[in-house]
Amino acid sequence: MRKKTNRRKFIEKSLASIAGVSAVSSCVNAPEDKVKESININFNKNYKWKMVTTWSPNMPVLGEGCNMFSEWVRKMSGGRLEIKVYGGGELIPSLESFDAVSNGAIEMGSGASYYWAGKIPSGQFFSSVPFGMNSKQMNSWIISGGGYKLYREIYEPFNLIPFVGGNTSMQMGGWFNKEINSFDDLKGLKMRIPGFGGKVLSKAGGTAVTVAGGEIYTNLERGVIDATEWIGPYHDYLMGFYQVAKYYYYPGWHEPGGVLEMIVNKDKFSELPSDLQEIIKKGIESLNIWMQCEFDSKNSEYLNKLLEEEGVQLKKFPKDVLDAFKLKTHEVIEEMVESDPKSKKIFDAYEKFRVSFKDWSTVSDKIYYEL
């Protein structure tokens, strides 16, 4: 009797499974318009966007990464969203990308938040702070430590959504035509250095100069400037700075973890179906990971080329110079947060995370590197 009962239950379960398969099959084979309606996606509508960058067209890693992102989006969307990338100067001047994306003339852009310091002073804390957090720590703070909420809050008035869209990782201290043996050697030094770093140098007695990327080599060669920072060994090698400057200094105290950003026009983003919004988000996340890996990989390779093949003199900044830069950094930040409540709010959150992360780094990364 038990066998018959078990057999009956088995048959009933089997019939239920078949019915379920039929139901799924009928759903899969339902008319296409019914499927579209149920998930609220218009498969017949295509979107064509433009992206402007602050980087020169097809610039290695930076512009290259934007091109890759565009291709990823095209593939993941099945061609429903195409993003045409324009390098700096191809469609509009590089530093006009913020306004162009803000007013909706362009859908998205790639740059760094310290480029817009005149519009959003507090935004600089989402790029890089001298003697501040490195790339790993910045990613942790913004993505998982509450930073994104503050980041998007200060971009909201400009109708923009910011995303972490890459990281240069630890930069180098720069190329110098004279040795820096003490703090006194900074006095009168003319150096191409932007953002917080430029303000710190000025306080230390030097002169921060704004020079377009394409003009740095010539200005360094002719003595218009005495020194320049750029990015790291890979891009510095490609720029040929080793041909016109003798000394290559480290560490990159001014940009220990240079966060790059993607900005998207909020209205344009809202018009996209939810699946395309998600594709953009995941594409940018992938870009962020790839870019940092690419920078670290290439920089390790090209530092060796500079030292072994080009005979570059690698030098560490003297302790009193680094101490002076650190002191002046505190002064610059104090002046900023005293005059701008938003900057104070963000810096307080930044500093709280930095200190807590430092405790973890001390028993993890730091001790490991010292083994």
Image (cartoon, rainbow, N blue to C red):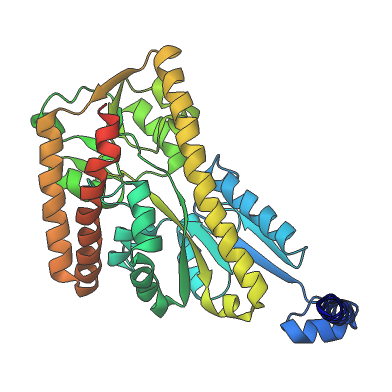
- Number of dots carrying numbers: 0
Identified at 29% across, 33% down, the residue is: 368
Horizontal placement of 212 versus 317: left or right? Answer: right
Q: Quadrant of residue 86?
A: bottom right
Residue with the most extreme front position: 1
**In which quadrant will I find the N terminus?**
bottom right
Q: Position of residue 186 (x, y in %)?
A: 15, 34
Residue 42 can be seen in this image: yes
Q: Nearer the viewer, residue 86 or 277?
A: 277
Q: Position of residue 273 (x, y in %)?
A: 67, 78
Q: Nearer the viewer, residue 4 or 371?
A: 4
Residue 205 can be seen in this image: no
Q: Quadrant of residue 344?
A: bottom left
Vertical relation: 330 (above or below) 106: above
Identified at 32% across, 68% down, the residue is: 120
Identified at 77% across, 63% down, the residue is: 79
Q: Quadrant of residue 143?
A: bottom left
Horizontal placement of 324 versus 6: left or right? Answer: left
Horizontal placement of 310 versus 58: left or right? Answer: left
Vertical relation: 223 (above or below) 128: above
Q: Position of residue 197 (x, y in %)?
A: 25, 47
Q: Position of residue 299 (x, y in %)?
A: 45, 31
**In which quadrant will I find the C terminus?**
top left
Q: Nearer the viewer, residue 333 or 163?
A: 163
